Image (cartoon, helix red, strand yellow):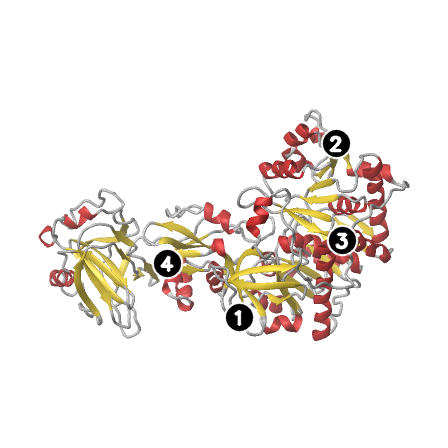
Amino acid sequence: MAGVTQRVFTNAAPTLLDILQFGRGHGGADFLVFADRRWTFDQFFADVDALAATLQHDMGVQPGDRIAIAMRNCSDWIITFAASVHVGAVAVLINSWGSAEELQFTLRDSDPAILAADLPRTRLGVDVLSERGIPVLFSDVDGDETGLESVPHLDVRTIRDAVAAGRGRDYVKAPQATHDTALLLYTSGSTGHPKGVLYRHIAVGQSLMHMMLVGFLGVEFGGPVELRAEASVEAHLVTVPLFHATGLFGGFLLPCAVGHKIVLLRKWDAETAMQVIEAEKITMMSTVPAILKDLLTHPRLADHDVSSIARVAAAGAATPADLPDLISDKLGIANRSSGYGMTETTSVCATMSGPVFDLKPTAAGIVSPIIDLRVVDVEEEVLPPGHEGEIQLRGVIVTPGYWHRDDLTHDAFTSDGWLRTGDLGRIDDDGFLHITGRIKEIVIRGGENIAPVEIENVAYRHTGVKEVAVFGVPDDAMGEELAMVCHPQPGFAPTEDELRRHMRNALPGFKVPKYIRLTDTPLPRNASEKIHRLAIRNNFTVDPIPSDSPASATRRPESVRRVVTGHDTQGKAVFVEDRLVEPISVAMTSTVYHQLWRADAPSTFPDSGAIGPSTTFFPQLGGYRFFLLTLPPGEGHGNLDGVDIDAGLRELQDKLPGVLETNDFDSPGMHTTETVDMEIVLSGEIVLELDDGIETTLRAGDVNIQNGTRHRWHNRGTQPAVVAVAMVGASRAKPS
């Protein structure tokens, strides 16, 4: 294609219609279960043929017309989709979880001949439907058509009536070519307007053959998977939206082709899912990690028999570090899988299952034989294995572009035809693909690139963590700081301090989130059931959430018992103050350095932004105010000229005998250099031991002194050094 040789499966179905035709060969076997209704394959295709006849004869659908579908997962969705394919229409899959603005934009953009929708989505689209005169093929899954009686000039026909009207009528199955457009899948639109991703018929067939290959390889290497717990047929629980590739291909097209039963849920609910698994003897779940973890950590899981589940597949997002063990512990199965793909690649890229999965359970999989993958740096130079960069893809299953958006298509592809995924990853020496993050999710803190997924995986190793999201928030001094929002496991109540200690044991200090919040409510998810990091970030505020707010269980200390600084042989702090002091955070300016810092001094000062509000001060410590900061090895910091740090500490010690102790005023490796005029960032942290003995980390730096003359300090030692900057009187300050 386009002068590029592409690898294909020679025996793949050439068109989407051919795939559906495979399903007709399964006759009277159970196929579809939704709510209290059931369909065999014969009954399902009888309804499909009846609706197709009505679409063709009564509603005037021609080959190439677009039929948009916007409704929750239900039997009407699947019947409408299949009927559309049979008459040669292009199915437009709309995010049914989107806003009114997104739905209306998609209708205007795709300009469908018909909208198939339930009551909520019809209501959201009434302005465009009336404006464009688009008829509605109505599903009563969420309420009947009487809810639309107040809407004028709306042409509504129920799917139930359309199926009844088409029974016994013939129609012509439209011819289709492999490179014709088969589908339009609109992205979720989490940033900007949704984009219509074009799928060709050949890509759909190739994608399904890839999925079959993965299944056959699992049998080849791991042996056949026997049905368990009195299950008599393979049964899939569809837990993700059908309007996305994962749901459409794994939840409908593949089971239809190979003769498996599918069970639809109106919406995801772990309790309902457990009941359905037990009643329908579900054998297979292909879903995103968040849903799988929600099921396996549910407090009532043991109350239901879910032993029929013999296979699970978690894809669509990075696999939490604890998920493989959770699958083994709760389901007792080793046949599991993971994968990586995207809407633009019909969900295909890398996959693995069974014994192959066990080799690298945290990897995304092995790259499909029908796709080319390369990893490039910021200059789009190809990187060797083991190096992290942007993943770029090319192959028969890659979309040719976006509907009516040549500009977006141009931006998405390189000049030589590679799709820019925006995902970061690497290929290891064994050929496994590892996803390390998203380019847009990378947090740049003080010039350091940090991938949130690395930090999330560490957090998931804590037994009290059920869901977590890490992201960057703006910071005046560092550019960005890390923030983490955590939803605990039922029955667990981890504290911010406990989580911070857990993170510190596995991560370097600059990767430990500055802000940690705990929430009693599950984290929001997008339409793909992935944790919606963008939504969480947009709703996050650096200001502390009130302690009585249900949005946060973060512990805010009211008093500090010991202030620990300095360092010992293990790099921990040693500076002790036994009296209770109140920590306060105030915004400061450089004029503070010229004030008398005593107990009767004002606790707030003019805020010009010269010193950021993250600086923490401890008032009333022997009548003096001071702040603390650490200097990691090799890093330099500074203070205003004229403030003698060592002398200030000694004066404090003289005035507070037996209370203020230090192990070393002149920390090993600490040296002063020449006086310089430059911008200096003060950055560090101290460890506090609270009244109840719990330690917490207090960041007392991130201070950007923008003007003035300073001494430059360097820590040339191998251990973190600590500086306590004590303001002991105006006589020690040199006015600028």
Give the CA distance from mark 4 to mark 3.
48 Å
The residue lying at 72 percent from left, 46 percent from top is 74
Q: Which of pointers 1 and 4 indicates the residue nearer the eye? A: 1
Circles 4 and 2: CB atoms closer than 8 Å: no
Q: Residue furthest front?
A: 3
Query: Is label 4 or label 2 in front?
Result: 4
Q: Earlier in the sequence, mark 1 or mark 4?
A: 1
Left or right? Give the position of 492 relative to 292: left
**Which one is closest to the eye, mark 4 or mark 3?**
3
Side (left or right) of 117 relative to 661: right
Q: Earlier in the sequence, mark 2 or mark 3?
A: 2
Q: Earlier in the sequence, mark 4 or mark 3?
A: 3
Q: Residue 447 bears which disc, if any?
A: 4
Q: Position of residue 656 (x, y in %)?
A: 14, 61
* Depth order, front residue of 205/410: 410
Quadrant of residue 621 in the image? bottom left
**Dot 1: element:** loop
Residue 156 has which mark?
Answer: 2
View extreme (left): residue? 731
The reply to whether residue 659 is visible in this rendering is: no
Q: CA distance from mark 1 to mark 4?
A: 25 Å
Q: Position of residue 164 (x, y in %)?
A: 85, 38
Q: Secondary structure at mark 3?
A: loop
Among numbered discs 1 and 3, the one appearing first in the sequence: 3
